[in-house]
Structures are given as C-alpha cells and as structure tokens.
Image (cartoon, rainbow, N blue to C red):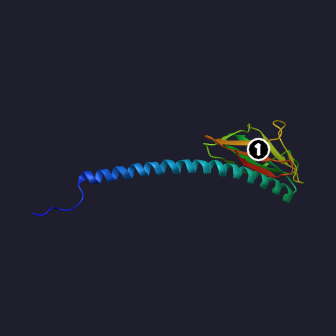
Amino acid sequence: MGRKTGFTLVDLLIAMTMMAALMGLGYSSLTKVRDRLGLEESAHRIAQDIQKCRSLAIAKTVYCRVLFNDAHSYQVATSNNGSRWVPRYTATIDLSVNSSWSSGDKIIFNSKGFANFPIAPSPFIITLTQEEDTYVVIPTMVGAVRMVKQ
C-alpha cells in the first residue's frame, strides 16, 4: 500500500510556533512605532495649538491663553480684557509622554499677537520625552513656534 501524503501533527505545531514567534516580533515593533508617533503627535499638537491661539487673538482682537493644567493637559481660553477667561477647549497628550511644564504655566497672546511667557525659564521651552526620544517645542514672543527632535 502506498504512503499517504499530508502534514503530521508535529509539522503543524512547528509551523504554528514559528508563526506565533514572528507575530510577537511584529507586534513589539508596531508598539514601539505607535509610541514614537504618540510623542511626535503630541509635540505637533502643542505647537499647532500655540499658533492657533495667537491667530485667534489677532482675528477676534482678544487675549488668548494656553494654560498648562497638569503634566498631560492644557487649556486654550480667550478673554476680552485679560482677566476673565472663557475656556475654548482642553487638550490632552499621550499618558506615556512626559512633559517639562509646571502646572499653572501659561502663554498669553494679546490682540496684536505678541506673547507673554512665565517668568522662568526664559526662554520658555516645552520638552516632551518618551523613553529615549525627545522633542522640544520653543514658542517665541511673536508667535512662531519651533519644534526640534533631539
């Protein structure tokens, strides 16, 4: 009688083990890429919100403030006279990202688009880190924002 062709149980187990190992490697690589993108997205969002706040101050002839609440959130608000602030929106950054700002730090733009920063540090620099990756966001007095990957 002839020999039957096909896969044995051992063949199938070996193939499944190799596939599981490859999938595990792929998953860990995707997780690292996703985390890196979370850091980059957070840095871009902060830079864009600072610029958006300046544009809003000029367009509406109001004061606009970016107030850093805690290590992972900040609020954009407007005011007609610089004393009573009306919140526009609150933004959060990825919880795995560490920020350098202190709670209560703020950037305030007047109706001409010029910024007022916290007294210290000068210049006001926002550092975002995640593991060994770092982004630095540097707003200027005239509203330009530089973002640098270190």
Q: Is residue 135 left or right of residue 16?
A: right
Instruction: Characterize the local packing of mark 1: few (<14), some (14-19) or many (20 or more) Cα atoms within 10 angstroms.
Output: some
- The image quadrant where one finds the C terminus is top right
Q: Position of residue 38 (x, y in %)?
A: 62, 49
Q: Residue at x 15, y 61 (%)?
A: 3
Q: Residue at x 55, y 47 (%)?
A: 32
Q: Is residue 80 above or below residue 95?
A: below
Which residue of the protein is positioned furthest toward the left in this rendering?
1
Q: Is residue 49 above or below residue 102?
A: below
Q: Is residue 50 above or below residue 3?
A: above
Q: Is residue 143 left or right of residue 132?
A: right
Q: How many marks?
A: 1
- The image quadrant where one finds the N terminus is bottom left
Which residue of the protein is positioned furthest toward the bottom in this rendering?
2
| Kind of residue at disc 1 | Leu
Q: Position of residue 91 (x, y in %)?
A: 69, 49
Q: Position of residue 33 (x, y in %)?
A: 57, 50
Please give the residue where the numbered disc 1 appears in the rendered image.
67
Q: 130 or 29: nearer the eye? A: 29
Which residue of the protein is positioned furthest toward the front in this rendering?
2
Q: Position of residue 45 (x, y in %)?
A: 70, 52
**Location of residue 5 by image quarter:** bottom left
Q: Is residue 24 left or right of residue 57?
A: left
